[in-house]
Structure formats: structure tokens, C-alpha cells
Amino acid sequence: MTIEELLQQYLQGKRRFWGAALREAELMNVALGGIDLSYGDLRHIRIGKANLSRASLRQTDLSEAILWGTDLSEADLYQAVLREADLTGAKLVQARLDEAVLLKASLGGANLTRAKLAQAMLIHADLRPSSDQRTDLGWADLTRADLSYADLGAATLRHANLTHAKLCRANLSRRSQWGDVVTDLSHACLRHADLSYADLRGAALHEADLRGADLTGTLLEGADLQGATMPDGTVQG
């Protein structure tokens, strides 16, 4: 199927395009809300600034795709492969990314508010701020997600659920180049999370729940732990 055929059929009301092979195609600035491209091959596709809100991309291969600034609000990306994909500034509010593969993905400045990322793989993912906005993971579900070596400096993770998440050697430190902006983990649930050797210097962790968390070698210099519940159950004054 060609891009022209897909767009024509979409305009005629068709929404399901399961298994579509659109490798290296270009769909910049298009409006394809509600489209179903599940199980497709979209490797290296360029969909920058497009509207894919409520789209279904279940188990779709989007490796090295260009998705910067794309609206993927409420999209279903369950088990999608987004290895080294560029999602800089993308809107992923309430998107489903459970078990998605986001290894080395670029998510700088993306809005992931209330997104579901349970058991997602975000190893070496880049979640630093973009040039004009912070990465927002407020209220996101990151249960058992693997964020080992990920760069989350200056990201917002207020009220995020990071229960049993892997954050080994992740960078969650204060960002001086952003006007000394801190990584915000206030009220986050980090119960039984692996924070071994993670960098949390200057991070905001007030009222965070760290019960059972692994803090082996964790850097906490200057972190705000006011009211946080520590691994042993004690509450910081």
C-alpha cells in the first residue's frame, strides 16, 4: 500500500490498516486521528507534527521513526517497538505504552502526563528537557518499567508510580543549564524501586514513598526528602 492509497482510503472513512508496510514513508503534518496501524512496519517513518490522537499502534515497529511534535494523546502503543525513535516534544497524554520498547528513544520535552508505561523498556532513553519545555511524566504509571541509565534530569515525575521500576544508574539530578531546575519526584511512589547508583542530587523527593527501595550507592546530596518515607519505613522530618 502506498501513502497516497492510505490517505485516500482514510478520507473515505476506512480506519483499520493492520500490518501496513510503510517503512521510510513520510506523513508530516497529516491528521490521522483514530487510525489503526497495529502490527505494521513503520520503521524509519517520518510523522513529525502529525495528529495521531487515539490511534492504535499495538505491536507496531516504529524503530528509528521521526515522531517529534506528534500528537499521540490516548494512542494505544501497547508492545510497540520505538527503539531510537525521536519523540521530542510529542504529546502522549494518557497514551498506552505498556511493555513498549523505547531503548535509546528521545523523549525530551514530551508530555507523558498520565501515560501508562508499565513494564516498558526505557534503557538509555533521553528524557531531558527540550529547548522550550520539560518532559512531563506526572501521574504516569511506570510500574516495573526499566529506566536503567536513562537521563531524566529536570523531568517532572510528580505522583508517578515507579513501583518496582529499575532506575539503576539513571540520571535524575538537578539541571543547572535549565536555570537550576530540579527533577521533581514529589509524591512519587518508588516502593521497591532499584535506585542503585542513580544520581538524585538536588532532586525533589518530598512526600515520596521509598519503602523497600534499593539505595545502594545512590547520590542524594542536596535532595529534598522532607516528608519522604525511607526504605526502612521511617519518615524524614
Image (tube, helix red, strand yellow):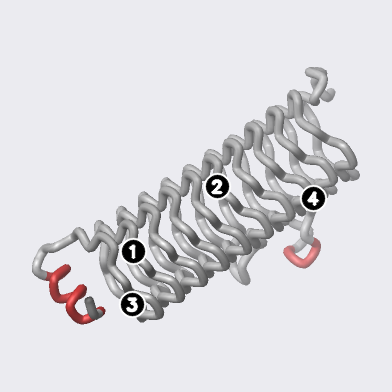
Label 2 and label 3: CA atoms lie apart by 26 Å
- Quarter of the image where one finds residue 13: bottom left
* Camera-side mark, 1 or 4: 1
Element class at badge 2: loop
The residue mark sitting in front, 2 or 1, is 1
Q: Nearer the viewer, mark 2 or mark 3?
A: 2
Residue topped by disc 2: 120
Indicate the position of residue 91 as horizontal and vertical percent values: 45, 59
Under mark 1, the amino acid is Gly
- Disc sitting over residue 40 in the figure: 1
Check disc 2 and give the amino acid type: Ala
Q: What residue type is disc 3 on?
A: Leu
Q: Position of residue 173 (x, y in %)?
A: 79, 52
Helix, strand, or loop for circle 3?
Answer: loop
Q: Decide: marks 2, 1 in contact (CB < 8 A)?
A: no
Checking the image for residue 169, the label placed there is 4
Is the Cβ of the residue at disc 2 closer than 8 Å to that at disc 3?
A: no
> How far apart in space, not on screen, are marks 2 and 1 (Cα)?
19 Å
Residue depicted at x 65% and y 38%? 165
Q: Compare residues 220 and 83 and report the one nearer the observer.
A: 83
Q: Provide the secondary structure element on which disc 4 rests.
A: loop
